[in-house]
Image (tube, rainbow, N blue to C red):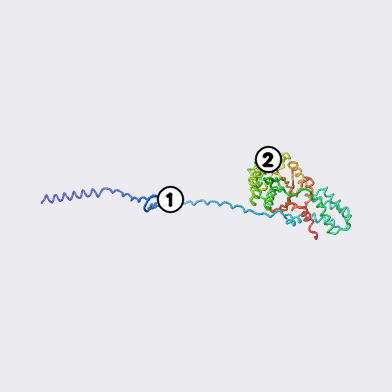
Amino acid sequence: MDYTIFAVIIFVVALLVFGGVFLIRPRRPEAPPKAPPQERGGGTGTATAEPEAEAPPEEAAGPVVAPEPVPEAPPAPEIEMPPPSAGRLVRLRARLARSQNALGKGLLSLLSADRLDESTWEEIEDTLITSDIGVTAATQIVESLRTKVKVLGSRTPEEVRGLLRAELLAQIETDQDRAVRTEPHAGVPAVVMVVGVNGTGKTTTTGKLARVLVGDGRSVVLGAADTFRAAAAEQLATWGSRVGAPVVRKDEGADPASVAFDAVSRGIADGVDTVIVDTAGRLHTKTGLMDELGKVKRVIEKKTPVNEVLLVLDATTGQNGLRQARVFAEVVNITGIVLTKLDGTAKGGIIVQVQRELGVPVKLVGLGEGPDDLAPFDPEAFVDAILGDADQ
């Protein structure tokens, strides 16, 4: 009996020891369940989506940086459609009449005096000379008027106006063609060189001429060959963008002849009607100017003839403008004059003097600061605007 109890006790102790070994053994971590494989394309059966990855804890994430806004491209400038050149001078007649009022009304008042003595005729001649018409032209006008007044006898306001109108027209009119040659020829564009001293409105005139041509239905390429002034190229680019005319330009200080050549080449390649080249206007020495402008013209003519060389003159400069005109006429073959700032002076008589001096006609006149204030010159409209209406 004692052996039986003893055996039971040993069995119970052994069982306890053996069971304790299993209780104190460390448990292995369970492996995460494997995700079922996702079906590859081309297989059969239903595709199973991969489980979404858990988001990292918030404390481990870096600061959220907002993306920088992408700057919007500036809108393309709206292309303008300028008015046609026909009738421009007539539309600007009122402005011209206001600026030349002193000349016309002063002459009419003197000629309408009850008694035209020697001092009155001298005053008439002085009025003409101060309008920059020139001494020779003023003397001729006075002598012709004196003869006609003696023959006429009585002088009504209409007769006086008619006499003065005829004399002014005789001095301004010329047999030379005033048309600006801008039509393409032999499959290549017409080339217009614009020359003149800086400050006369040369680059502005180039841009306004482009507007005139675009308004008449022509296609234009502009050449910014005034490479000595960065502002000139920027200014020309602004004019061109407004009417859709491409501008050929290079860095400041580049060879002007190279820019002119590239502009003409671009015009030929694009099949445009007219290429307008804005040239430098420095007047340091006559020799330097001659070399520069002469080179530009020669290089252009390797591609095509230059159809027009327009000299831009400031109407307010008087005799100084004429001296500039002589220098440019010696450098290149001037074919026409553009007279700017005619709206701010009563010295419209410079038209007579510059035509006599250079032997070339005034083809265009600038009558204001507006983009469409450049007009083809019409002698009759000009004289009528100076003298006013017949009933005034």
Q: Position of residue 107 (x, y in %)?
A: 82, 55
Note whether 386 is above or below 336 in the view shown: below
Query: Residue 70 or 263: which is nearer the viewer?
Result: 263
Residue drawn at (19%, 50%) of the image? 15
Q: Which residue matches tag 1?
A: 61
Q: Position of residue 383 (x, y in %)?
A: 79, 54
Q: Is residue 196 visible?
A: no
Q: Position of residue 76 (x, y in %)?
A: 60, 52
Query: Residue 93 or 378: which is nearer the viewer?
Result: 378
Q: Position of residue 53 (x, y in %)?
A: 39, 51
Query: Residue 194 or 103: which is nearer the viewer?
Result: 194
The local crowd at label 1, few if under 14, some if 14 to 19, many if 20 or more residues have their Cα within 10 Å, is few
Residue drawn at (75%, 41%) of the image? 330
- Asked if residue 340 lies left or right of residue 17, the reply is right
- The residue furthest left is 1
Mark with earlier residue (2, 1): 1
- C-beta proximity under 8 Å, tags 2 and 1: no
- Tell me the kind of residue under disc 2: Lys
Label of residue 302 in the image = 2
